[in-house]
Amino acid sequence: MFGAISTAAVSAAGFAGPVRDAVVAGRLAEVPPPALDAARAALVDGLHLVVATTAVLCLVAAVVALVLVRDRDRVGAAPAG
């Protein structure tokens, strides 16, 4: 999933084919010098999008965990019955 997000961000920057694959993999040495700055920016944008997506998913998971844990299963809860 995160590879698809990163690839989409790099593709949106106008890279295609083997250059896109090199940028997504972080192999910037394989990118032609005129496109190096744009490739670096596209890689950083893709990674930023992946990290932001991960942060949102972690926040959602934390909220779901807080809602779904039963009160009696919480640490320090009074014994049942």
Image: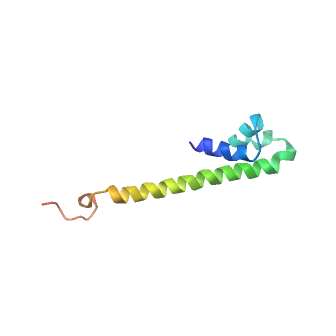
Location of residue 8 by image quarter: top right
In the displayed structure, does residue 64 sit left or right of residue 75?
Answer: right
Q: Residue at x 20, y 65 (%)?
A: 78
**Residue 61's spot in the image, x, y percent?**
43, 54
In the displayed structure, does residue 23 sit left or right of residue 77?
Answer: right
**Residue 45's spot in the image, x, y percent?**
69, 53
Any part of residue 26 in sight? no
Q: Quadrant of the N terminus?
A: top right
Q: Is residue 56 above or below residue 30?
A: below
Q: Is residue 25 above or below residue 46?
A: above
Q: Residue at x 76, y 34 (%)?
A: 18
Q: Residue at x 72, y 46 (%)?
A: 12
Any part of residue 48 in sight? yes
Q: Is residue 26 above or below residue 61?
A: above
Location of residue 26 by image quarter: top right
Q: Quadrant of the C terminus?
A: bottom left
How many labels were placed on the picture? 0
Q: Residue at x 31, y 56 (%)?
A: 69
In the displayed structure, does residue 38 sit left or right of residue 81?
Answer: right
Looking at this view, name the residue that lies furthest to the left. Answer: 81
**Residue 71's spot in the image, x, y percent?**
26, 61
**Residue 34's spot in the image, x, y percent?**
87, 46
